[in-house]
C-alpha cells in the first residue's frame, strides 16, 4: 500500500503521503480482481487469497496500516462481517503494474 502512495518499496504507509486515494484504488482493484491480496483469518493461520467479493463491504484499516499492522475492517456503517484478514500481502509485480510512476503525478 505504501508503494502505491509513495512509489518506493520498504516505506511505511502514511495517510497523506504521496497519493491519498491509494487505499481506495487498491480496494477497487482487489474488488475487480485486478490484484490479489492474501491474508490470514487467524493469528496462527495460513495465508489465503482474500475473495474479491470481500472488498465490496470491507477495506484496509488505514490507521492500523500506519502502525505497521496490515489488516481489514468493515467499510461502511451497518455492514456486518465476522471475517477479518490480518498480515495482508500482495505480489510486488501486481502493484508495479497497477501503480506506475505516472500514477502519483
Image: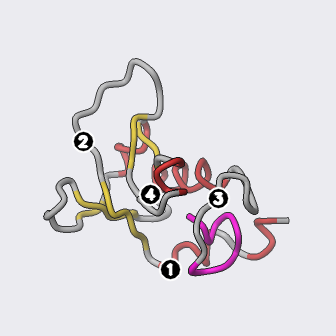
Q: Which numbered disc, 2 or 1, marks the residue that appears first in the sequence?
A: 2
Q: CA distance from mark 2 to mark 1?
A: 25 Å
Q: Nearer the viewer, mark 4 or mark 1?
A: 1
**Quadrant for the N terminus in the image:** bottom right
Residue 82 covered by magenta stretch: no
Q: CA distance from mark 4 to mark 1?
A: 16 Å
The residue to which callout 3 is attached is 14
Badge 3 marks a residue whose secondary structure is loop
Tag count: 4
| Lateral position of residue 70 relative to residue 105, left or right | left
Q: Nearer the viewer, mark 2 or mark 4?
A: 2
Q: Do callouts 2 and 1 mark residues in contact (Cβ within 8 Å)? A: no
Where does the image place residue 45, in percent across and percent down from the top left? 14, 63
Where does the image place residue 31, in percent across and percent down from the top left? 46, 49
The local crowd at label 2, few if under 14, some if 14 to 19, many if 20 or more residues have their Cα within 10 Å, is: few
Q: Which numbered disc, 3 or 1, marks the residue that appears first in the sequence?
A: 3
Amino acid at each position: 500500500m505504501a508503494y502505491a502512495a509513495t512509489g518506493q518499496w520498504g516505506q511505511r504507509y502514511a495517510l497523506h503521503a504521496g497519493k491519498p486515494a491509494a487505499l481506495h484504488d487498491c480496494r477497487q482493484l482487489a474488488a475487480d480482481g485486478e490484484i490479489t491480496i492474501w491474508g490470514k483469518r487467524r493469528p496462527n493461520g495460513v495465508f489465503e487469497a482474500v475473495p474479491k467479493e470481500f472488498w465490496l463491504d470491507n477495506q484496509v484499516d488505514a490507521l492500523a496500516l500506519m502502525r505497521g499492522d496490515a489488516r481489514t475492517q468493515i467499510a461502511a456503517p451497518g455492514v456486518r462481517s465476522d471475517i477479518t484478514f490480518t498480515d495482508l500481502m500482495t505480489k510486488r509485480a501486481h502493484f508495479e503494474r497497477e501503480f506506475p510512476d505516472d500514477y502519483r503525478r
